[in-house]
Image (cartoon, rainbow, N blue to C red):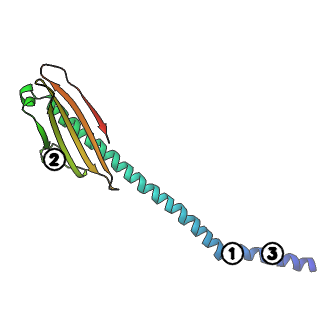
Amino acid sequence: MKKIKQNELQQRHSTKSKKGFSLVELMVGSAALTLVLAGTFSGLGQAICISEVVQSSNFAAQFLQSEMDDIHLLQWSEVANLQGKEVIDPEDWNFSTVPLRDAAFTRIVSSRGTSQKEIRLIVEWTDLRGIRHSNEYVTYYTKDGLFDYSYRSL
């Protein structure tokens, strides 16, 4: 008889503990879930910033490539007339929108003797975090000669 009552008490105790979680277990689980979600959202924010920088850099490179191609189509007489620093107006582009914040577009032309020009195209912009970026293309245009360009990102 004693064994029956003891088994009955053990069954009651085991079914009672299986009914739900204690307050401590819920608090520990909630804290763990909060940490996981905070890490996930932090990573998502970083991914959005990185994606924005990549897209902005791609747009800046497309713009510089387009401007450089336009310069390479000019005759030497037109290039010879270019001189100094000039701010390029985005309204003159064929792009429908400019996805760069606080963008500045500059062309700097300097003479290298009487038959050569150095042409620099610079794009500067600010990303979502407020960090300033720039891309720069440089070409040397020579009368009756070959020309090419190089680029760098800062």
Question: Mark 1 highlights which residue?
Answer: 19
- Amino acid type at circle 2 is Pro
Residue 73 occupies which quadrant of the picture? top left
Contact (CB < 8 A) between labels 3 and 1?
A: no
- Amino acid type at circle 1 is Lys
Q: Can you tell which mark lies on residue 11?
A: 3
Would you place residue 129 above or below residue 94 in this image? below
- Amino acid type at circle 3 is Gln
Mark nearer the N terminus (3 vs 1)? 3
Is 43 on the left or on the right of 26, as rendered? left
Question: Mark 2 highlights which residue?
Answer: 90
In front of the other: 21 or 78: 78
State which mark lies toward you, 2 or 1: 2
Marks 2 and 3 sit apart, C-alpha to C-alpha, by 79 Å
Would you place residue 41 above or below residue 110 in this image? below
The N terminus sits in image quarter: bottom right
Contact (CB < 8 A) between labels 2 and 3?
A: no
Contact (CB < 8 A) between labels 2 and 1?
A: no
Q: Give the structural element (helix, strand or loop) at label 2.
A: helix
What residue do we see at 13% from left, 48% from top? 91
Marks 2 and 1 sit apart, C-alpha to C-alpha, by 67 Å
Q: Where is residue 77 in the image (x, y as percent from the top left)?
A: 6, 27
